[in-house]
Image (tube, rainbow, N blue to C red):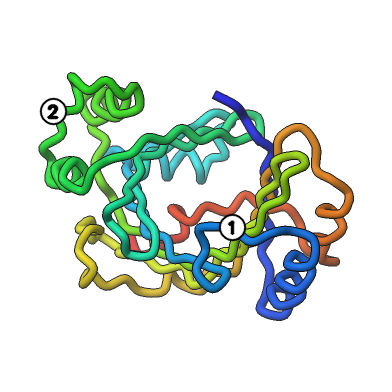
């Protein structure tokens, strides 16, 4: 598992317009984006004691969380992901799920994962068995992504963050989500060994500081 550097900044609408112009001049858009953006729908898992949420609120140095997500309403491409944090660095492991597999997991029929040959699926099974991990809430948002090959840099602008509150039927396109409170626009910068100066300069916004923002935490605002 490879850990990457990650910065998150809260920005406003004016910052967003400035950044989009700058980034478009020096970076390439994500090839999976449609008209420069895509919609992400995720389903986050947590324990009955809200372990993932509490560890985030308490600033625990080493933590992880599971989620299932798909893009632009296309359930033909669904991924299971585990995001890990350690000493301010982040890592992500992922594997594909079929729509049927995702639906079974959401419905509580997850024991088939025990015999799976995908390590991440087996790890989710262990978490759902030992820690009682269960789907907790839907998180929707719009992402504007940019890529830069040197340093394996990825810069994204995330906006319109919405919560399903207590809904977990994330495969249903009719499932409605609501704005997650007064959620900000989030600039994320991720890179491997080094961050090129041209990108460092492009994302610099005076008065904006690095901030440990969590969309999952924001989407639990109502419970």
Residue closest to the eye, 211 or 141 = 141
| Residue 49 visible somewhere in the drawing | no
Horizontal and vertical percent position of residue 11:
68, 69
- In the image, is residue 150 above or below residue 91? below
Q: Is residue 135 visible?
A: yes
Against 47, residue 27 (above or below) is below
Q: Position of residue 65 (x, y in %)?
A: 42, 38
27 relative to 103 in the view: left or right:
right
The residue beneath circle 2 is: 111
**Within the image, what quadrant is residue 45 found in?**
top left
Q: CB atoms at circles 2 and 1 under 8 Å apart?
A: no
Cα–Cα span, label 2 and label 1: 36 Å
Task: Choose between 134 and 102: the one closer to the eye.
Answer: 102
- Residue ID for mark 1: 30
Residue 189 lies, in percent from the top left, at 69, 51
What secondary structure is marked by label 2? Answer: helix
- The secondary structure type at the circle numbered 1 is loop
Rendered residue at 31%/24% (across/down): 118
Q: Is residue 83 above or below residue 183?
A: above
Q: Earlier in the sequence, mark 2 or mark 1?
A: 1
- Mark 1, Cα crowd under 10 Å, few <14 / some 14-19 / many 20+, is some
Is label 2 or label 1 in front? 1
Q: Count neighbours of disc 2 (C-alpha within 10 A) and say few if under 14, some if 14 to 19, many if 20 or more.
A: some
Q: Quadrant of the N terminus?
A: top right
Vertical comparison of 150 with 183: above or below: above
Q: Quadrant of residue 132?
A: top left
Q: Residue at x 42, y 60 (%)?
A: 40
| Residue at 35% from the left image edge and 27% from the top image edge | 120
Q: Nearer the viewer, residue 41 or 84?
A: 41
């Amino acid at each position: 598992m490879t850990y990457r550097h990650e910065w998150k900044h809260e920005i406003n609408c004016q910052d967003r317009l400035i950044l989009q112009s700058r980034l478009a001049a020096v970076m390439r858009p994500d090839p999976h984006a449609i008209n420069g953006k895509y919609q992400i729908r995720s389903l986050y898992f947590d324990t009955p004691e809200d372990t993932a949420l509490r560890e985030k609120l308490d600033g625990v140095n080493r933590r992880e969380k599971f989620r299932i997500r798909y893009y632009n309403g296309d359930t033909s491409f669904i991924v299971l992901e585990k995001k890990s944090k350690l000493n301010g660095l982040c890592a992500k492991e992922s594997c594909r799920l079929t729509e049927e597999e995702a639906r079974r997991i959401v419905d509580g029929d997850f024991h088939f994962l025990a015999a799976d040959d995908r390590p991440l699926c087996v790890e989710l099974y262990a978490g759902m068995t030992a820690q009682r991990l269960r789907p907790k809430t839907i998180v929707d948002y719009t992402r504007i992504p940019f890529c830069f090959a040197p340093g394996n840099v990825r810069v994204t602008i995330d906006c319109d963050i919405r919560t399903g509150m207590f809904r977990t039927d994330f495969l249903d396109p009719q499932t409605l989500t609501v704005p997650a409170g007064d959620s900000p626009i989030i600039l994320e910068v991720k890179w491997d060994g080094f961050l090129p100066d041209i990108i460092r300069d492009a994302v610099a916004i005076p008065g904006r500081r690095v901030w440990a923002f969590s969309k999952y935490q924001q989407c639990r605002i109502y419970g």
